[in-house]
Image: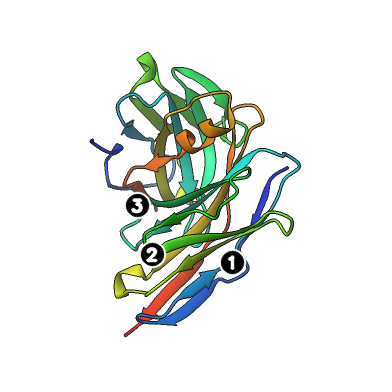
Amino acid sequence: EAGVAQSPRYKIIEKRQSVAFWCNPISGHATLYWYQQILGQGPKLLIQFQNNGVVDDSQLPKDRFSAERLKGVDSTLKIQPAKLEDSAVYLCASSLVRRGGLAGLKQETQYFGPGTRLLVL
Amino acid sequence: AQKITQTQPGMFVQEKEAVTLDCTYDTSDQSYGLFWYKQPSSGEMIFLIYQGSYDEQNATEGRYSLNFQKARKSANLVISASQLGDSAMYFCAMRDRGGYQKVTFGTGTKLQVIP
């Protein structure tokens, strides 16, 4: 079974430039997540999609970050314009969600892609 | 609100010895799941083990086991027979049943295995 794919793996840009990241989740996984992981910290959820709908974007800086998941499969995360503090690893994850029942929680294990390392100069 | 606490920023362990990584959590939900992930220097988050709040037995996956103490709200990861390849960051995470099951991560513990 193929894992979560992300591209690019590395990106260096100057502040005020724009950048976009792409994620392809595991086939059949309805839920997709974008996380920001700053060096030395745990991942912070930016946005969560259930199919092609947003279910949580409370920590997404909406003045500069945007994300979409057209057709409920691939997703893109965009930063426009970038700031120095956006330098981080951007992780995409997906999970097979089954609502209802205690046994469903294990099915909601998130599987992560390799991440995109962004450096803003 | 959910909270995950990992109090050990760094740990050392001798190769072939066992090590315990601490994790405590705070939630008002009765139904939740606890996860441990490994993050090598390459950056990818690797799922290790899962424990459900209603599971009566502690979870085990090969050399990994989870010491789950529900009353104390702790979910410590035990790695037996440490190997050099176990050197990495380890993150504890929790998902509750509210809404769309938001996941919260701890700050991580850096484990270094000494030959």
What number of labels is visible? 3
User: Residue tagged by mark 1?
Assistant: B22
User: What is the spatial separation of the Cα atoms under label 1 and label 2, in whole angstroms?
Assistant: 16 Å
Q: Look at 35% across and 55% down and name the residue there.
A: B43
Secondary structure under badge 3? loop
Question: Where residue B3 sits in the image (x, y, percent)?
Answer: 68, 50
Give residue A23's position: percent from left, percent from top: 33, 33
- The residue that disc 3 covers is B44
Residue type at tag 2: Arg
Residue ranking furthest to the top: A71
Nearest to the eye among marks 3 and 2: give it.
2
Q: Chain of mark 3?
A: B
Type of amino acid under label 1: Asp
Q: Secondary structure at mark 2?
A: loop
In the rendering, which numbered label is found on residue B63? 2
Please report whichever mark, 3 or 2, sits nearer to the chain's N-terminal start.
Answer: 3
Callout 3–callout 2 Cβ contact below 8 Å: no
